[in-house]
Image (spheres, rainbow, N blue to C red):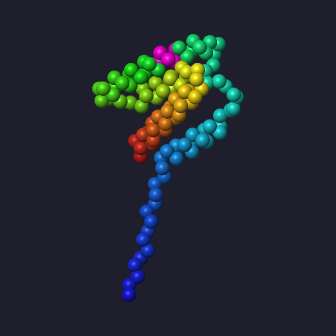
Amino acid sequence: MTEKAPLKRATRKPDPTTTVLAEVRAARKALVDEGRPLGGGLRPERARLHYRREADRWAEIAFARSLADRPGLDAELLASLNTALATADSAAARAELIQVAALATAAIEQLDQEAS
């Protein structure tokens, strides 16, 4: 009788998102916790108006690019970031910042993929 060689298990590739989030976690630990508000300055309400205009502008750019079949993460990222900064509602800002983190993670993964 001949024995079959044991099957080798294929090495699983690490999840790119897990790798990026580990780097983000390390970078976050390096930040100083100062309890800063999301929007600062002397007139945060005026800044929110500016960010709202910028969010709308970048959302329009992202939409126009999608219609022209020329999308880019930059416009989506800037629209989401400015939307987060424009809102006074912490739950809405949090949700939008999650979107910013997702878009930033996708951008980093794309850069890593292009580099390899």
The answer to which quarter of the image holds residue 45 is top right
Residue for point 61% across, 24% down = 38
Front residue (pair 5, 102): 102
Could you tell me residue 78's position as x and y percent?
47, 25
Count of labels in the image: 0
Figure quadrant of the N terminus: bottom left
26 sits to left or right of 15: right
Residue at the right extreme of this rendering? 34
In the rendered image, the vertical position of residue 104 relative to residue 40, given as above or below: below
Front residue (pair 2, 97): 97
Residue at the bottom extreme of this rendering? 1
In the rendered image, the vertical position of residue 55 relative to residue 113, given as above or below: above
Observer able to see residue 75: yes
Residue for point 61% across, 21% down = 39
Could you tell me residue 89's position as x and y percent?
58, 23
Observer able to see residue 115: no
Residue for point 57% across, 40% down = 24
Segment tinted magenta in the rendering? 50-54
Could you tell me residue 18's position as x and y percent?
52, 47
- Taken as a whole, is the magenta stretch helix, strand or loop? helix
Residue for point 46% across, 29% down = 77
Could you tell me residue 34's position as x and y percent?
70, 28
Q: Was residue 61 drawn as part of the magenta stretch in this picture?
A: no
21 sits to left or right of 2: right
In the rendered image, the vertical position of residue 18 relative to residue 80, given as above or below: below
Front residue (pair 23, 41): 41
